[in-house]
Structure formats: C-alpha cells, structure tokens
Amino acid sequence: MSSFYLTTPIYYASGEPHLGHAYTTILADVIARYRRRAGQDVLFLTGTDEHGQKIQEAAAEQGMSPLELCDLMAGRFEAAWEDLGISNDRFIRTTEAEHRAVVAALLERLKDNGHIYEAEYAGWYSVGQERYFTEKEIGPDRVDPIAGGPVQRIREKNYFFRMSHFQERLIRHIEENPDWIVPATRRNEVLGFLAQPLADLSISRPRSRIHWGIPLPWDDAQVCYVWVDALTNYVTASGAIDPDAPKEERGFGDLRPSRWPADVHLMGKDILTTHSVYWPTLLMGANLPLPRKILAHGWWVVGDTKMSKSLGNVVDPLDLRDRFGTGAVRWYLMREMATGQDASYTPGRFLTRYDELSNILGNLAHRTLSMVKRYRGGVVPDAPADGLAADTEAALTAYRDGLEGYRLHAGFAAAMNLARGANGFVEAREPWVLARDPEGADELDRTLATLVRTLAVLAAMFEPVTPTKARKLSMRLDLDHVPLFAELDALEVGGRSVTVGSPLFPRVDPD
RNA sequence: GCCGGAGUAGCUCAGUUGGUCAGAGCAGCGGAAUCAUAAUCCGCGUGUCGGGGGUUCAAGUCCCUCCUCCGGCACCA
C-alpha cells in the first residue's frame, strides 16, 4: 500500500481558531480522506505551536503559566477540528517531550555538520514591547509601531544557521522541480526572493529575554527560535528521528522506516517563506530529504475587503456550521475557492453553494429513493446499469485529476456535475411514465438500478468533503460503508432495501 | 523602486503545449414535467476575451507597449 503524509501548519496557540485555520485544515482533511478512499495509507498531521514570546506574554497577561494557556488553546483547536469533522491522525504539540527532544537532536545535528555559528544579532529593540522590530516596521522615524515608543539599537548573542550556504542549491531545486511550490505564482515569488543574497538565520534567543522555548543542547542560556522549533514538528511526527538513540543512529542518515519526507505541506501564503526557504535549507543542513510539495493557498476576503478582527468582519466557520451543518461549510470552502487563489466570502455565494447541495445532490437522492420505494417497494431492482456510464467515467476522471492535482474546486465541480447529469437522466427516462405502463417495467428497473448505482458513486466522491452526509446516504442505500473507489465497479445494488429518510440537505430559509 | 500576477457574458469565474476557445454556474426570460426538499429538466447570451501595435496560414492563448487592480520584496509564529 502506498503511503501519503500531509501536514497543516501547527497553529500558534496564542489565538482562537478562525476561518484561515479552518480552511487549511479542511483542505488537508479533504485530501486525506480522498487519499484514504483511494487506498493509500495516510498520515494527516496538524497541531499547535506553543513556544515563543507571544505565548509567554499572553500567559502572563491572563495570569496563567505558559503551559496552562497552551493546554487551554490546544483544547480549543482540537474541539474546533472535531466540530468540523477533521480526521487528523495526529495532533502534535510542540511542548511534547518527544518534539522537544527531536528539535534538540536536529539542532545538534546542524551544529555537528558545521552549519551553526555564534554571532551577535543587532536589531532595533523596544523596551516597552520587549521585542525587536524590523527596519520596515519602525519606519524612518524609528519608533515602535505598536505603542509609538522609542526603539534602541542593541546587540545580543545569538546562534546562526548558515542558511546562505544553501541558497544556490535551493534555487536549483526549485528550478528543477517546477511543481515543488504551487501555485506557480508563489514559486515565482520565492525565486524572486532568492534572487537577493540570502542572509543567515538567527536560530536562538537569549533565555534571559525569552524563557518559554526549547534550550539549545549545547548552551542552555539560549532557546531555539520558535520557527525552527515549529517547522521541526513535521519531522517529529514522521518518526524519522529517534532522539534517544546514540548520535550516529538517530536516523538522519537512513530515516529508518518513517513517514519522512512529507508528500505535501499545506499552508496559507503568509508563511510561504518559512516553509520554502527556512525549512528546506534546515533540512539540507541536517541531510534530510525535502518535502515533495509545498502548497500555499490564498486568503478569504469578505466582499472585497480583507478579513480582520479590527474591521469586525471575521467570518466564524463554527457559526455557519451551526446553521447549515459541517458538510455545507466544508463544501462551500472547497468548492468556492480555486485552490491556491484568494476567494471572496459573501452570504449570497454561501447560500448558492448550499442550494447546490440541497437541490442537485440532496434532491437527486431523495427523488431516487422515493421512486424505489413507491414503485418497487423500497427494494432496488436487480437490473443491469443502463445509461450514465460515460458521464460517470468522465466525472470520476475529472474528479481524480482535480483532487490529485490540487485543484479541488474543479474536482468537486465534476462530482456535482455528475449529480446534475443524473437529474437530467431522470427527466429523460420519466420513471413516473414508465411506472404507469406494464411494458415499461424493465426499463424502469434498469433506470432505478442505474440511479442507485450513481448515488453510490456520488457518496464515494462526496465523502472527502461531506463525510457525514456521504455516510448517511450510503446507509440509506443499504451499504455498510461509503464505498472505496476500488469497490465501485463490483458494487451490487440489486436487492438492497433502501430508506428514503428526511432530506440530506434540508432547505434553509434565507433570512 | 525592483520582481511577479490579474483584467473573458449582469455577477463569480473555466479556458493545458496558439487552430470547434468564445464557455460553465448563478441571476434573468420562456417552456416541460410532477418521482422529489415548489426541488428538477429543456431552450434563450451580437460578450471589441482591458486599450493599441506586432509575430503567424491561424492568438484570450506568443511578443511589445499603455491603462487599471493586486501580490511579493525575510527572521512578523
């Protein structure tokens, strides 16, 4: 069985889950479910990033220890993912002992390979904010951009990773693997970024300033820079590194039987640089293979305005779920956003997409099952499939291309299109006319059997995006599980006792 | 400033390597049908494919230029 390892970023535990987190995570979940359905052994990883200054500060503000805050927030994320039907195989937290040990092992490895050196970091520090700001942030007036207070040029000891050493190799890798970073526009941006000389990466902070982090194995007066800590989670969860083993046997050379490298890292475009520059060069420095693909998706905007807390226009996926159901939210997000691009959320578009589920797919199921019940006593006729074969094949092909090629919107459009075609098939066959005429009995049998078969195919196609509804539909077809793709050809529908049930996607009054 | 995208029917957008590429969905108008969640199905679009120029037998599809909008330009988790 082939395997597939995919990741979301681990989310920073200082804030609540929002639509951005939900989109990435649902995207990952849909891909994971598709891959499982296609017969692959999937490892789907998500989690929380729990170290660093902001956690330290947020915890202090709320009168908690950092770990107490992280426990609380990790719980929020896990609950949100539960609510949204996320099927992650592992929820990693960077405060886990295993992760902390792997980070230490990775750092040690980098150092042993000669890629770490000690130097002074010089930057603009705000005493008021207790942090550094970049040149861009402080502007020409050199004031801290949050409170407007003064900043001062100070120096501190840091350890640096020789990222510059890997610049050429990284450029070559991107050029030789055009689909490594998708979409292509993001790849271009990274190449543009790499056209400039790459500086080395400061990978530590003095513990006197930031105590909430992973100490460097060779200098516990310094803690690991949070991004290095965070990115390493992908390797931790892969099981590639055994930090408890002697140095030479930790797995950097042979990876043992592990899930590394990841097949795809998913993320928002805001953290593309860390994933496509920092992370690959760190891996190169540790002699670990690079992930096979990096996908940076776009942002949801509201109307034509960016979604932001300060504007008060943030869309809460859990609110939508309460009203329309998890499947509707997942469907909207996957169907409406061209994977990789930005998309605009509007209530009207959401309703349109919901109507699609309700009117095209839900109604197809309901009318088909009703006819089986009314005309054949609820038992699917044992008749050969007749019609829709070409439509089904074409839909499955387009669907697979879409889901494997990271054009989920196109894949699901193909699935919905099959349901559309099946509705047309009903109109063309007019089962209600056939039912009135004894001569029409055979054709009616074939028509109903074909429609039920098509519903089984649709259940399989929709399971990744609307898992609960797909399961419900399968149960009504008297199947004990949602069929895998490999099972569809041999699937027998004749003789099954179907259940009509209430509508899968009930009409919702727009108000 | 430098680099890179985008500009296709009222709306949201598809359009691989140039030759049924002028399309889909939604909205709108007209019609059919009644199995179904008044859901469905069929029919209807004369759009300068942002403007201009060029290459080619042939260009939304390549090149140049102009206009408009957007994104990236590092240690911010």
Image (spheres, coloured by chain):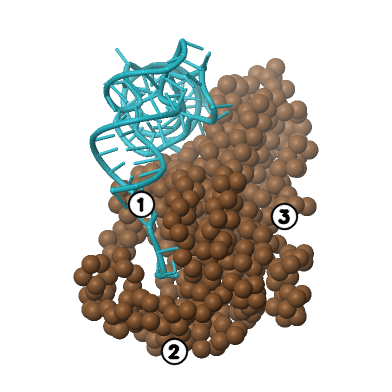
Mark 3 to mark 1: distance in Å? 35 Å
Res. A320 visible in picture: yes
Amino acid type, mark 3: Ser
Neighbours of disc 2 within 10 Å: few (<14), some (14-19), many (20+):
few
- Residue labelled with disc 1: A301
Mark 2 to mark 3: distance in Å? 44 Å
**Sequence order check: which comes first, mark 2 or mark 3?**
3
Placement of A418 over or under A236, stated as above or below: above
Q: Where residue A347 sits: x, y (%)?
A: 35, 48
At x 70%, y 62%, the residue is A259
Res. A93 visible in picture: no
Neighbours of disc 3 within 10 Å: few (<14), some (14-19), many (20+):
some
Left or right of A253: which side holds A229? left
Numbered circle sitting on residue A3: 3
Neighbours of disc 1 within 10 Å: few (<14), some (14-19), many (20+):
some
Placement of B24 over or under A150, stated as above or below: above
Q: Which chain is brown?
A: A
Placement of A92 over or under A210, stated as above or below: above
Indicate the quadrant where residue A237 lies. Answer: bottom right
Q: Chain of mark 2?
A: A
Q: Where residue A336 sits: x, y (%)?
A: 45, 44
Q: Which chain is cyan?
A: B
At x 73%, y 78%, the residue is A247
Amino acid type, mark 1: Val
Q: Which is nearer the eye, B66 or B14?
A: B66
Q: Which is nearer the eye, A141 or A128?
A: A141
Left or right of A119: which side holds A471? right
